[in-house]
Image (spheres, rainbow, N blue to C red):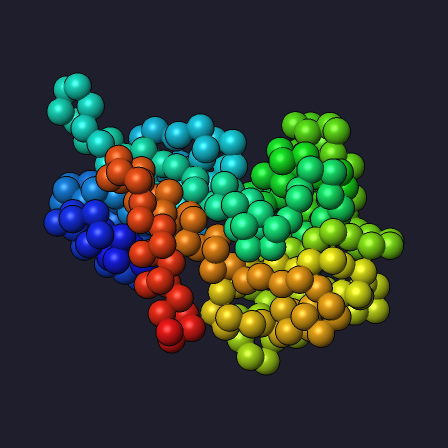
C-alpha cells in the first residue's frame, strides 16, 4: 500500500517492515533518526510506549494517547526531532462512515475491547457524539478506566461498562479475537445477540471475514472489516511524511490485491 502510494507520488523512497522487540524501540527510533529516515509507522505494542520516546507530540497523539506515525524533522538549529502523530482515530471513523454508511451522532454503539485500539476508538466515537456507548472488555477495570475518561471529557455521552439491552446501531470489534481460525466470538453469546445490531465492524482485515463478521452477516447485519481503517491511517501517514495528497485509490487497489488477492 505505502510503496504503491510512494511510487504514484514519484518519491525516491522505500517503505520496509522491521520486527522490533518493545525493549529495543527507543534505540531503534534513535537509529532511524540518525540514518535519515523520513519517518516510521508503529504498531502494537509500540503505540503507547512511543508516547514517552518522541521529542514532540502532535495534538492528535496527545488527544488519543497513542503514537502510530512518527515524522523526523529538522528544527531551525539543524537538530533532527521525532514528532509523534496518531492517524488511527480519524481512520476508524472515516471507514465506519464510508464502508458501513454509519451515522455516529446519537448512535448506540457496543465496543468490544479496551486495549490501545479500543481506547482510541472509544474516545473518538465519544467525540463524534454517539448517544450511548457500551464498553465490554475481558478485564473490566480497563473498560472502567476508559469510561471514566469519557465521562470527564464528553459528559453528553452515556457510557456503561456492560452489554446493551435492546437494539444497537453498531457493534465494533477492537479485540484480537478473529485473527486465528480457531478463535471464538469476541462477545458473550449468552448475554448479547448479533440480531440486536444493525451493523458490525471488525478492525481485523486478515482474514477478510472473521467468525464475528460471518456471524454478523448471518444475523442480518451490514458488515465491514478493518481494511478501510488500515487504508485511511496509512494514507494520512503518507501525507504527514510527504506533504502531498495521498493517492488513496492507488493505495486501496494495492491493499485489496494483497488482502483479497485481486
Q: Is residue 181 left or right of residue 189?
A: left
Q: Position of residue 85 (x, y in %)?
A: 39, 37
Residue visible at 26% across and 35% down in the picture: 243
Q: Is residue 19 left or right of residue 124?
A: left
Considering only vertical position in the picture, is 75 above or below 243? above
Quadrant of the image for the N terminus?
Answer: bottom left
Residue visible at 66% across and 62% down in the picture: 222
Can residue 185 be seen here? The reply is no
Which is more toward the observer, 52 or 210? 210
Q: Quadrant of residue 146?
A: top right
Q: Position of residue 200 (x, y in %)?
A: 66, 60
Can residue 34 be seen here? The reply is yes
Q: Is residue 174 left or right of residue 68?
A: right
Residue visible at 31% across and 56% down in the picture: 250
Considering only vertical position in the picture, is 248 above or below 71? below
Q: Quadrant of residue 59?
A: top left
Amino acid at each position: 500500500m505505502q510503496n504503491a502510494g510512494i511510487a504514484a507520488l514519484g518519491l525516491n523512497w522505500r517503505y520496509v517492515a522491521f520486527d522490533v522487540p518493545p525493549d529495543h524501540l527507543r534505540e531503534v527510533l534513535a537509529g532511524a533518526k540518525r540514518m535519515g529516515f523520513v519517518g516510521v509507522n508503529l504498531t502494537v505494542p509500540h503505540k503507547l510506549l512511543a508516547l514517552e520516546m518522541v521529542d514532540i507530540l502532535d495534538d492528535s497523539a496527545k488527544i488519543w494517547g497513542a503514537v502510530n506515525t512518527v515524522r523526523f524533522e529538522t528544527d531551525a538549529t539543524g537538530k533532527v526531532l521525532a514528532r509523534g502523530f496518531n492517524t488511527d482515530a480519524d481512520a476508524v471513523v472515516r471507514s465506519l462512515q464510508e464502508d458501513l454508511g454509519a451515522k455516529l451522532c446519537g448512535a448506540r454503539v457496543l465496543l468490544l475491547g479496551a486495549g490501545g485500539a479500543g481506547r482510541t476508538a472509544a474516545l473518538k466515537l465519544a467525540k463524534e457524539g454517539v448517544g450511548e456507548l457500551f464498553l465490554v472488555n475481558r478485564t473490566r477495570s480497563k473498560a472502567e478506566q476508559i469510561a471514566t475518561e469519557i465521562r470527564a471529557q464528553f459528559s453528553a455521552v452515556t457510557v456503561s461498562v456492560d452489554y446493551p439491552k435492546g437494539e444497537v446501531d453498531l457493534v465494533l470489534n477492537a479485540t484480537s479475537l478473529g485473527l486465528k481460525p480457531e478463535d471464538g466470538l469476541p462477545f458473550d453469546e449468552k448475554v448479547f445477540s448479533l440480531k440486536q445490531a444493525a451493523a458490525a465492524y471488525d478492525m481485523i482485515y486478515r482474514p477478510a471475514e472473521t467468525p464475528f463478521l460471518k456471524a454478523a452477516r448471518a444475523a442480518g447485519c451490514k458488515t465491514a472489516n478493518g481494511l478501510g481503517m488500515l487504508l485511511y491511517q496509512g494514507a494520512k501517514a503518507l501525507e504527514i511524511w510527504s506533504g502531498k495528497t495521498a493517492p488513496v485509490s492507488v493505495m486501496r487497489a494495492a491493499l485489496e490485491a494483497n488482502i483479497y488477492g485481486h
